[in-house]
């Protein structure tokens, strides 16, 4: 399957190859050239799995407040001149 080299020297690894090597975004890969001049792509040491995306720090606390403020009461408190 041919692919084009970008101006930055990048290529896209076809999905069926990524799946075969169990490569996910962020996984380390190694390139080598064998005696026949073929480029060999391998997962570094073993197929690497990318870490699960981190949960957004706001999602982690969203909905956990236990203060029973009503919006109007809070606004009065914040805008108070006392």
Image (cartoon, rainbow, N blue to C red):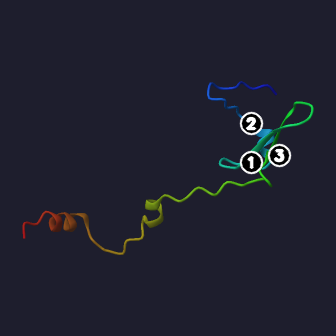
Real-space Cα separation, disc 1 to disc 2, in angstroms: 10 Å
Residue at the right extreme of this rendering = 36
Crowd band around label 3 with a 10 angstrom C-alpha radius: few (<14), some (14–19), many (20+) = few
Mark 3 lies on a secondary structure that is: helix
Left or right of 15: which side holds 36?
A: right
Is 79 situated left or right of 49 in this image?
Answer: left
User: Does residue 25 sit above or below 67 in this rendering?
Assistant: above
Give me the residue at 92% from left, 31% from top.
Answer: 36
Name the one closer to the observer, 12 or 72: 12
Q: Is residue 69 above or below residue 57?
A: below
Q: Is residue 44 above or below residue 79?
A: above
Q: Secondary structure at mark 1?
A: loop
Real-space Cα separation, disc 1 to disc 3, in angstroms? 8 Å
Q: Quadrant of residue 2?
A: top right
Q: CB under 8 Å between callouts 2 and 3?
A: no
Give me the C-alpha separation between circle 2 and circle 3: 11 Å
Provide the residue designation for mark 3. Answer: 20
Tell which circle, 1 or 2, labels the residue nearer the N-terminal end. Answer: 2
For numbered disc 2, what is the local secondary structure?
loop
Residue corresponding to mark 2 = 13
Count up the numbered dots. 3
Q: Residues within 10 Å of mark 2 (few under 14, many from 20)?
A: few
**Badge 1, how many Cα within 10 Å: few under 14, some, many 20+?**
many
For the residues bearing labels 1 and 2, Cβ distance under 8 angstroms: yes
x and y percentages locating residue 7 in the rendered image: 62, 24
Determine the residue positioned at 36% across, 75% down. Answer: 66
First reached walking from the N terminus: tag 2 or tag 3: 2
Q: Residue at x 48, y 65 (%)?
A: 60
State the residue position of label 1: 23
**Place of residue 57 in the rendered image (x, y in percent of width and height, measured from the top left):** 46, 61
Quadrant placement of the C terminus: bottom left
Q: Quadrant of the N terminus?
A: top right
């Amino acid at each position: 399957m041919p692919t084009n080299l970008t101006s930055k020297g990048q290529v896209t690894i076809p999905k069926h190859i990524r799946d075969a090597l169990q490569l996910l975004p962020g996984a380390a890969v190694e390139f080598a050239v064998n005696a026949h001049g073929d480029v060999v792509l391998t997962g570094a040491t073993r197929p690497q799995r990318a870490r699960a995306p981190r949960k957004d720090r706001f999602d982690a606390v969203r909905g956990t407040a236990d203060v029973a403020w009503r919006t109007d009461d809070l606004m009065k408190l914040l805008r108070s001149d006392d």
